[in-house]
Image (tube, rainbow, N blue to C red):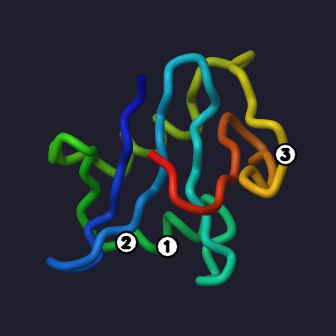
Amino acid sequence: MGTNYYININPNKQYHIGKSSYGWNFSLHVEPSEGINSLQDIKRLWVGKTIQDEYDDVVTKRKMLDLITKRQHGLSRHEVSQFCIGHGPGTWDLLIGEFC
């Protein structure tokens, strides 16, 4: 079980930030083909935008950053593969493609 988070880019477009799942590092959704390769790139994308979870609850940028970076250590990591292209320097993994 987990929760997905989105940046509202405009009324017709959202960017999937990633998913917080119990027992796992945060699954940070990156899109290298769009120049989104890291947490820093996603933070630039959310400037001036609203963040919401999959239940349409608004999430502050501070809380979103905490959900990604202040997770309990020792959580499961995704194995590096064509789906997980790497591990962030903190408690998040870099995942590509569509996932929920």
Q: Which residue is mark 1?
A: 44
- Measured as percent of width and height from the top left, residue 56 is found at 15, 47
Is the residue marked by circle 2 packed among few (<14), some (14-19), or many (20+) residues within 10 Å?
few
- Horizontal side of 34 relative to 10 (left or right) equals right
Q: Which residue is mark 2?
A: 47
Residue lying farthest to the right in this orientation: 80
Q: CA distance from mark 2 to mark 1?
A: 6 Å
Q: Which residue is mark 3?
A: 80
Are circles 2 and 1 on residues that touch, CB within 8 Å? yes
Q: Earlier in the sequence, mark 2 or mark 3?
A: 2
Point out the frontmost of discs 1 and 3.
3
- Horizontal side of 35 relative to 85 (left or right) equals left
- Measured as percent of width and height from the top left, residue 91 is found at 67, 34
Which image quadrant: the C terminus?
A: top left
Residue lying farthest to the bottom in this orientation: 34
Q: Is residue 22 above or below residue 57?
A: above
> What residue is drawn where x is 69% and y is 44%?
93
Q: Is residue 4 above or below residue 75?
A: below
> What residue is drawn where x is 56% and y is 57%?
29
